[in-house]
């Protein structure tokens, strides 16, 4: 279990470890966003980061019940306040949707439907040679691509669970099966 080696950015008021699971209840009006479209910057979301030298692959199971606009839970890879990516499920358009936000000075937002159980899913990120590969799974076995993007090639990263509720407080998220290790060297369309 990697959690004991992690440290909080914006530690929530309510969180605990139960066995090998991290349980978090989000604080009010928390978010990660930087300028694009909305014109503001938020760096108040909850992130439990593990420091790792690149290249690496991290994997995480996420369980949450999304109810309000922009409720979100997933994984983040962070360099600093202006360079990061977050990916996971986010409540938008009255449904849980896959989402990712890549921030390199300013934030973009990519979103789409998720055909599995949004209340229980897995994420995998691989950072290697200036590229980040984000994969999602509804069973922990099959890993379709969510996003492939340029990403800074630096000596160290922080990676781990992330959750936010920009419009409220009280999303309960459970994170488990968190692993971090050497970068997987698999073909782009290898779903294993």
Image: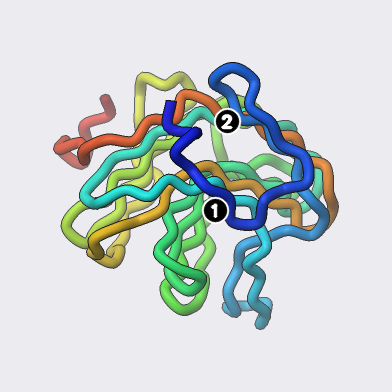
Q: Say whether marks 1 and 2 touch (CB < 8 Å).
A: no
Residue at point 36%, 38% (across, down)? 58
Task: Tell me: 63 left or right of 135.
Answer: right
Picture coordinates of residue 75, whole percent (x, y):
50, 45
SS label for mark 1: strand
Work out whether 39 lies above or below 44: below
Q: Which numbered circle lies on residue 175?
A: 2
Residue at point 71%, 42% (across, down)? 95
Picture coordinates of residue 109, whole percent (x, y):
53, 63
Task: Tell me: 184 left or right of 136.
Answer: left
Rounded to the nearest whole Å, what is the CA distance between mark 1 and mark 2? 22 Å
Q: Name the colouring of the figure.
A: rainbow
Q: Nearer the viewer, residue 159 or 117?
A: 159
Residue at point 16%, 35% (across, down)? 186
User: Of callouts 1 and 2, which one flags the residue occurring earlier in the amino acid sequence?
Assistant: 1
Work out whether 167 lies above or below 36: above
Q: Quadrant of residue 1?
A: top left
Work out whether 30 lies above or below 68: below
SS label for mark 2: strand
Picture coordinates of residue 51, whole percent (x, y):
38, 50
Work out whether 186 lies above or below 157: above
Task: Tell me: 80 left or right of 167.
Answer: left
| Quadrant occupied by the C terminus | top left
Q: Which numbered circle lies on residue 111?
A: 1
Picture coordinates of residue 93, whole percent (x, y):
73, 51
Residue at point 77%, 52% (across, down)? 69
């Amino acid at each position: 279990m990697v959690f004991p080696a992690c440290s909080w950015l914006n530690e929530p008021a309510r969180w605990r470890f139960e066995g090998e699971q991290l349980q978090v209840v989000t604080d009010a009006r928390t978010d990660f966003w930087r300028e694009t479209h909305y014109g503001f910057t938020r760096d108040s979301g909850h992130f439990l980061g593990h420091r790792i030298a690149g290249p690496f692959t991290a994997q995480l199971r996420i369980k949450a019940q999304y109810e309000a606009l922009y409720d979100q839970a997933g994984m983040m890879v962070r360099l600093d306040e202006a360079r990061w990516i977050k990916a996971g499920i986010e409540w938008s358009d009255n449904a849980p949707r896959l989402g990712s936000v890549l921030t390199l000075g300013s934030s973009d937002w990519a979103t789409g439907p998720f055909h599995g159980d949004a209340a229980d899913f897995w994420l995998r990120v691989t950072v290697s040679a200036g590229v980040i590969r984000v994969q999602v799974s509804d069973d922990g076995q099959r890993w379709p691509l969510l996003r492939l993007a340029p990403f800074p090639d630096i000596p160290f990263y922080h990676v781990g669970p992330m959750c936010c509720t920009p419009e409220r407080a009280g999303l309960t998220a459970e994170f488990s099966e968190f692993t971090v290790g050497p970068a997987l060297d698999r073909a782009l369309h290898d779903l294993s």
